[in-house]
């Protein structure tokens, strides 16, 4: 009997495009203004909505920020947290403050992605792992990110904010929780490597350091 192989496999050029967009995706902080046409934004959000979802709970909610004052208030919240983060970093504080950590003012679009309310109703897949709602939202964000890169637009995920303060600003109901501020729009260029690598803040680890077989290595790697 012949061993089963791939089913409904995409053509080689299509497969190559998928791997290429994954490799070329970057967390963008430098934007060039401009706009994201409504039809393109619609495709990106549809890609996000096609994400895998534990128990088909679809916990993602998207808030498109159209008001300039609301955008400015969001940026103020991020700046407050940027200063607090710098204080917490101790000797790396000055290096951190030199980093560009968001593009809220320059991006064509700002989207806030949130976990929806009433998630406790969804038990399937969450009884012992309630964080799977966050995992599902993260998959939606990744879908949007990859689709944006394929369309030639940059996207950056900003996580420097107080969730309660941002939720209050945007009128979130009880139980809903913001996860990400997404900056989206045209860029002059994409980083060749992750920005934190280019700036010397961090280094990437090879896959071999993170891949184990059957069990965690002994002694533990400690990394």
Image (cartoon, rainbow, N blue to C red):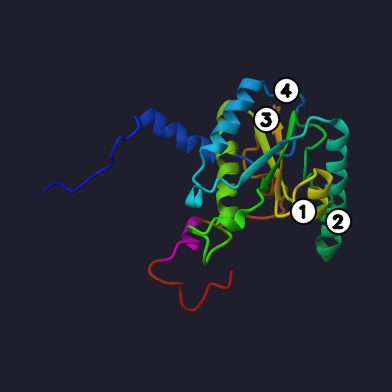
The numbered mark, 4 or 3, whose residue comes first in the sequence reads 4
**Disc ID at residue 10:** none
Q: How far is disc 2 from disc 3 in space, using C-alphas? A: 27 Å
The numbered mark, 2 or 1, whose residue comes first in the sequence reads 2
Query: Are circles 2 and 1 on residues that touch, CB within 8 Å?
Result: no
Q: Residue at x 61, y 44 (%)?
A: 60
Residue 63: within the magenta? no
Q: Residues within 10 Å of mark 3 (few under 14, many from 20)?
A: few
Q: How far is disc 2 from disc 1 in space, using C-alphas? A: 25 Å
The answer to whether any part of residue 190 appears in the image is yes
**Disc ID at residue 189:** 3
The numbered mark, 4 or 1, whose residue comes first in the sequence reads 4
The residue mark sitting in front, 4 or 2, is: 4
The residue where tag 1 is placed is 163
Query: Are circles 3 and 1 on residues that touch, CB within 8 Å?
Result: no
Q: Residue at x 46, y 72 (%)?
A: 216
The residue where tag 4 is placed is 35
Q: Is residue 99 left or right of residue 219?
A: right
Q: How far is disc 4 from disc 3 in space, using C-alphas? A: 16 Å
- Total of numbered circles in the picture? 4
- Residue 88: image location, x then y, percent: 83, 64
Q: How far is disc 4 from disc 1 in space, using C-alphas? A: 27 Å
Circle 3 SS class: loop
Circle 1 SS class: helix
The numbered mark, 2 or 3, whose residue comes first in the sequence reads 2
The residue where tag 2 is placed is 94
> Which span of residues is magenta-colored?
207-212
The residue mark sitting in front, 2 or 1, is: 1
- Residue 62: image location, x then y, percent: 67, 39
């Amino acid at each position: 009997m012949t061993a089963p192989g791939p089913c409904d496999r995409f053509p080689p050029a299509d497969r190559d495009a998928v791997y290429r967009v994954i490799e070329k995706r970057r967390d963008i902080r430098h934007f060039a203004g401009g706009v994201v046409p409504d039809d393109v934004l619609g495709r990106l959000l549809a890609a996000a909505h096609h994400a895998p979802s534990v128990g088909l709970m679809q916990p993602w909610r998207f808030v498109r920020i159209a008001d300039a004052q609301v955008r400015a208030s969001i940026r103020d919240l991020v700046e407050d947290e940027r200063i607090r983060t710098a204080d917490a970093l101790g000797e790396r504080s000055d290096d951190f403050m030199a980093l560009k950590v968001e593009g809220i003012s320059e991006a064509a679009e700002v989207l806030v992605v949130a976990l929806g309310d009433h998630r406790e109703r969804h038990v399937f897949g969450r009884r012992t792992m309630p964080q799977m709602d966050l995992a599902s939202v993260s998959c939606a964000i990744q879908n949007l990110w990859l689709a944006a890169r394929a369309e030639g637009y940059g996207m950056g995920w900003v996580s420097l904010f107080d969730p309660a303060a941002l939720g209050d600003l945007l009128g979130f109901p009880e139980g809903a929780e913001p996860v990400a501020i997404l900056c989206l729009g045209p860029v002059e260029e994409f980083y060749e490597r992750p920005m934190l690598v280019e700036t010397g803040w961090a280094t990437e680890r090879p896959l071999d350091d993170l891949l184990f077989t059957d069990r965690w290595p002994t002694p533990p790697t400690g990394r």
